[in-house]
Image: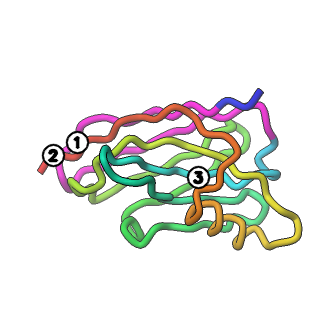
């Protein structure tokens, strides 16, 4: 059974930092793109960042480039999202999700597709991040 558990959210002032963790189990990291998505109340979902353990390919939404960093610790079955220079517009529920990789395409293409299209196979519960101004 696939399980994805996000944690690390909280209240932080603008300019501050948070690190989110996604504890994963029930699947092989190399078979999936793993990503962080966020949902803002009343607005749509955004793929924030995605990663493939196959070759380390990553994708970042333009809104977070240079501020957020995604990383994966296969030994701990955990994916992290380091968020720096947080802005009030980063306030959202963040959740992790996975998309099965298609061997016909490169991991980079799959990572970008997963994040931009949001076509995930499994998703976990979210963690709330609130950034005050």
Q: Position of residue 11 (x, y in %)?
A: 24, 37
Q: Residue furthest front?
A: 42
Mark 1 against mark 3, which lies toward the viewer? 3
Residues drawn in magenta: 4-27
Q: Mark 2, residues whose alpha carbon is within 10 Å: few (<14), some, or many (≥20)? A: some
Q: Mark 3, residues whose alpha carbon is within 10 Å: few (<14), some, or many (≥20)? A: many
Disc 1 element: strand
Side (left or right) of 55 relative to 10: right
Q: Position of residue 122 (x, y in %)?
A: 67, 40
Of mark 1 and mark 2, the one earlier in the sequence is: 1
Q: Position of residue 8 (x, y in %)?
A: 41, 35
Rounded to the nearest angstrom, the CA distance separating label 1 from label 2 is 6 Å
Rounded to the nearest angstrom, the CA distance separating label 1 from label 3 is 22 Å
CB-based contact (under 8 Å), mark 1 and mark 3? no
Rounded to the nearest angstrom, the CA distance separating label 3 from label 2 is 25 Å
CB-based contact (under 8 Å), mark 1 and mark 2? yes
Q: Main secondary structure of the magenta part?
A: strand
Side (left or right) of 100 relative to 7: right
- The answer to if 123 sits in the magenta stretch is no
Of mark 3 and mark 2, the one earlier in the sequence is: 3
CB-based contact (under 8 Å), mark 3 and mark 2? no
Q: Residue furthest top?
A: 1
Mark 1 against mark 2, which lies toward the viewer? 2
Residue identified by numbered label 3:
35
Side (left or right) of 32 relative to 79: right
Residue identified by numbered label 2:
132
Residue 95: mark: none
Q: Residue at position x 41%, y 70% from top?
A: 65
Disc 2 element: strand
Residue 12: mark: 1
The colour mode here is: rainbow
Q: Residue at position x 69%, y 38% from top?
A: 77
């Amino acid at each position: 059974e696939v399980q994805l558990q996000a944690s690390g959210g909280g209240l932080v002032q603008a300019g501050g930092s948070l690190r989110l963790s996604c504890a994963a189990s029930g699947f092989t990291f190399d078979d999936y793109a793993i990503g962080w998505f966020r949902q803002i109340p009343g607005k749509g979902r955004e793929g924030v960042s995605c990663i493939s353990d196959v070759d380390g390919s990553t994708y970042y939404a333009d809104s977070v480039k240079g501020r957020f960093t995604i990383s994966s610790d296969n030994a701990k079955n955990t994916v992290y999202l380091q968020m720096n220079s947080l802005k009030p517009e980063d306030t959202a529920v963040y959740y992790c999700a996975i998309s099965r990789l298609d061997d016909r395409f490169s991991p980079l293409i799959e990572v970008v597709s997963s994040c931009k299209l949001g076509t995930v196979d499994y998703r976990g519960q979210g963690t709330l991040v609130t950034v005050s101004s």
